[in-house]
Image (tube, rainbow, N blue to C red):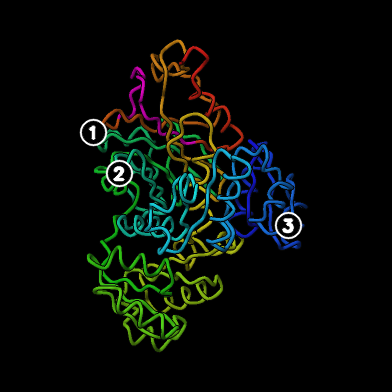
């Protein structure tokens, strides 16, 4: 695909890196020559210096015959105008834009072909908020992903010493839980993927990705690790867009306190939130944390825009007795450094946003894509279309489908049923496949499985 990315920041740069490695024709546009030079040196892409919404700049970037425009600059207005220009002057087929401001997002009538022609709206703040909310709902999970409108979930947990299945073969999972349908999709051991088979033995500290129907998730988690008590008391450091949205989403079920340094923002949060307590101060203020009984807090969430501030506040909160700490960390080098140590979970806004973008880049009928393990692996939901003649999967048993290497089928979702672990299952039209691809170089092969042949019309 020929893709133009507007904005060479964290999201634009991460997206360019992932898409360039998949043999796409990528052009990145930005006003920052230094950032473009850095990207150009590392990746096989074109770069264009200029204002992202200017028609002359877009033409220079190749908008005349681009398949997709992805506008992810730091300015909502620039992103929206760029999509309008691309539509009016160049008839770009697919236009994706990052729009952060709630004042725009809540007005859905703004984003239509007759108004501002944006095909896909992306809000990184909302993606991150949803990600954190799911982690709060499942204590002990490192990642929780929804498929088929939440009917099935893929969950990553770290196997702990003392878990019932640790030291046993995977095939024992069925014996332990005869009434629960689940499948281990992948295991990462010391950062290396292990293709799971029935005789794979789970070791302490393995990161285990398993898929199950939503109602069975907690039962499977309890087999792999000691179940944690639910969370009650939560402190959010940073009252920006993410902090505000998260507090709004969870304050009815948890005791929430927000620490925000800006006085005007504190007043705004106090007025707009119902039960959350808003405190003015620094999240790195030891006396403030002690005063607010940090040692009784279940989760401390550092959600400011500053990586260093988030790391320092999290380390302090953990030392003072917070049960679990999570932090937003934009810099991938920092994230790999701190996760699993004093900071329990490092949250990457770029990866949350990247998953949404990849859904629209993938070929075939791909419903959702989730980028995992810093982009090294992907979980994909695809729909089977056609008939036995035109499709490579319909009318065949699961055991007959020739999967690309490093790919597992975690589940099939048919209507309201989540079907797992049945090799004799015959695939029907409109079945949803949940797949885990450990090596991204096989993504194209997976896409081809779900592209109907010429007889499908």
Residue 409: image location, x then y, percent: 43, 30
Quarter assignment of residue 326 = bottom left
User: Of the residues under marks 2 and 1, which one precedes in the sequence?
Assistant: 1
Would you say residue 178 sits in the magenta stretch?
no
Report the residue marked by disc 2.
220
In the image, is residue 76 above or below residue 46?
Answer: below
Marks 3 and 2, Cα distance to the nearest angstrom? 46 Å
Magenta segment, prevailing SS (helix, strand or loop): loop
Give the residue at mark 3: 36
Residue range highlighted in magenta: 419-436
| 297 sits to left or right of 330 | left
Q: Secondary structure at mark 2?
A: helix
- The residue located at (44%, 19%) in the rendering is 393
Does residue 429 belong to the magenta stretch? yes
The x, y position of residue 6, in whole percent, is 63, 53
**Residue depicted at x 46% and y 46%:** 114
* Of the image marks 3 and 2, the number of the one nearer the N terminus: 3
Label 3: how many Cα within 10 Å (few below 14, some 14–19, many 20+): many
Real-space Cα separation, disc 1 to disc 3, in angstroms: 55 Å
First of labels 1, 3 by sequence position? 3
Label 3: element kind = helix
| Residue tagged 1 | 178
Question: How many neighbours does mark 2 have within 10 angstroms: few (below 14), some (14-19), or many (20 or more)?
Answer: many
Q: Would you say the residues marked 3 and 2 are in contact, meaning their CB atoms lie under 8 Å apart? A: no
Instruction: Indicate which label's residue lies in the foreground, 3 or 2.
Output: 3
Disc nearest the viewer among 1 and 3: 3
């Amino acid at each position: 695909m020929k893709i133009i990315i507007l904005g060479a920041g964290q999201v634009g740069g991460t997206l360019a890196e992932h898409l360039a490695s998949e043999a796409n024709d990528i052009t990145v546009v930005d006003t920052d020559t230094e950032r473009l030079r850095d990207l150009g040196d590392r990746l096989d892409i074109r770069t264009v210096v200029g204002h992202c919404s200017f028609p002359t700049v877009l033409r220079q970037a190749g908008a005349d015959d681009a398949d997709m425009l992805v506008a992810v600059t730091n300015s909502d207005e620039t992103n929206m105008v760029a999509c309008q220009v691309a539509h009016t002057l160049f008839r770009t087929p697919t236009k994706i834009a990052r729009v952060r401001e709630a004042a725009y997002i809540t007005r859905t009538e703004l984003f239509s072909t007759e108004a501002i022609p944006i095909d896909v709206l992306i809000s990184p703040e909302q993606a991150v908020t949803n990600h954190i909310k799911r982690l709060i709902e499942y204590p002990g999970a490192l990642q929780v992903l929804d498929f088929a409108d939440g009917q099935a979930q893929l969950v990553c947990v770290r196997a702990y010493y003392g878990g019932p299945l640790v030291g046993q073969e995977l095939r024992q999972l069925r014996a332990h839980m005869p009434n629960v349908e689940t499948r281990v999709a992948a295991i990462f051991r010391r950062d290396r993927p292990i293709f799971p088979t029935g005789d794979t033995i789970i070791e302490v500290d393995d990161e285990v990705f398993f898929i199950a129907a939503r109602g069975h998730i907690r039962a499977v988690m309890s087999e792999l690790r000691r179940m944690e008590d639910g969370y009650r008391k939560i402190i959010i450091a940073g009252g920006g867009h993410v902090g505000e949205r998260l507090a709004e989403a969870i304050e009815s079920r948890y005791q929430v306190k927000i620490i925000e340094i800006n006085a005007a923002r504190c007043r705004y949060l106090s007025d707009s939130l119902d039960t959350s307590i808003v405190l003015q101060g620094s999240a790195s203020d030891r006396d403030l944390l002690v005063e607010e009984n940090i040692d009784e807090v279940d989760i401390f969430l550092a959600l400011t825009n500053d990586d260093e501030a988030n790391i320092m506040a999290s380390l302090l909160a953990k030392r003072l007795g917070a049960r679990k700490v999570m932090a937003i960390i934009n810099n991938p080098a920092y994230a790999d450094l701190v996760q699993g140590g004093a900071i329990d979970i490092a949250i990457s806004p770029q990866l949350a946003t990247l998953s949404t973008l990849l859904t629209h880049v993938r070929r075939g009928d791909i419903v959702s894509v989730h980028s995992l393990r810093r982009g090294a692996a992907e979980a994909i939901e695809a729909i089977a279309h056609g008939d036995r003649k035109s499709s490579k999967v319909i009318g065949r048993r699961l055991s007959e489908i020739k999967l690309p290497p490093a790919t597992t089928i975690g589940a099939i979702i048919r209507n309201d049923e989540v079907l797992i672990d049945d090799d004799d299952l015959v695939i029907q039209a409109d079945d949803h496949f949940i797949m885990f691809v450990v090596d991204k170089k096989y993504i194209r092969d997976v896409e081809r499985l779900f592209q109907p042949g010429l007889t499908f019309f």
